[in-house]
Image (cartoon, rainbow, N blue to C red):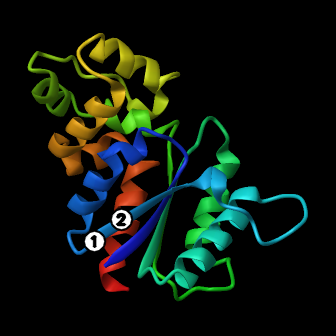
Amino acid sequence: MRVRVYHDGLHEASGALETLLSRLCPQIATCDFKSSIRLRSRQHGKGAGYLKKAAAAVAEAREEGFDAVVFLIDEDGDPERSQQMNAAQEGHLGDVLFPRAFGVAIRSFDAWMVADEAAMAKTLARTIDCQKSPEELKSPKEVARSIVAESMSLREFYAEVSRWVRIDHLEDRCPAGFAPFAQRVRSLLAS
């Protein structure tokens, strides 16, 4: 399965998201990453910016011969992003047949990377305390930076953590963002 993956951050495209996707849906053979910043809406007018971008993502992935599209953004404290991406997932794009997995990381993708202290400990070869509810952290990226300190870059850290993170644990710890995204990625198999 060839999948076009739209994302809104460098850390997602540095191996971490691809690893998570392949663990959730092993049938994904190829991931082609593209920044959602470059994605241009084909609809004009105000409102529902991510709904418009999601429609453009589906159209572009289909036109370019991909089998499915994955689109992951950070919530960044804006609940409308979740509403728009959920509407896009549910088929409010005019194209309900093209396989898709749209998701919103609550607050950000960084929260997923600090959700599993065992995966972080394995990555850094030292004990890491369990973080409070990842989706409630004010700044998950700063928490990650403080955990990593000078050990490695965040990109390297995220790529390695994604190899070891317990998927079921991540779903439990990030129920508003990761859990529905994981289910949507798994559903690509049924498409």
Q: CA distance from mark 1 to mark 2?
A: 7 Å
**Vertical side of 191 occupied by 71: above or below:** above
- Evaluate if marks 1 and 2 touch, with contact meaning CB atoms under 8 Å apart: yes
The kind of secondary structure element at disc 2 is: strand
Task: Say which quarter of the image contains residue 115.
Answer: top left
User: Residue 98's x, y, as percent?
Assistant: 51, 84
Quarter occupied by the C terminus: bottom left
Q: Amino acid at mark 1?
A: Ile
User: Residue 175's x, y, as percent?
Assistant: 39, 47
Question: In the image, 15: left or right of 81?
Answer: left
Task: Say which quarter of the image contains residue 44.
Answer: bottom right
Identified at 44% across, 79% down, the residue is 66
Q: Which residue is mark 1?
A: 28
In the foreground, 52 or 159: 159
**Vertical side of 155 occupied by 153: above or below:** above
User: Residue 153's x, y, as percent?
Assistant: 32, 23
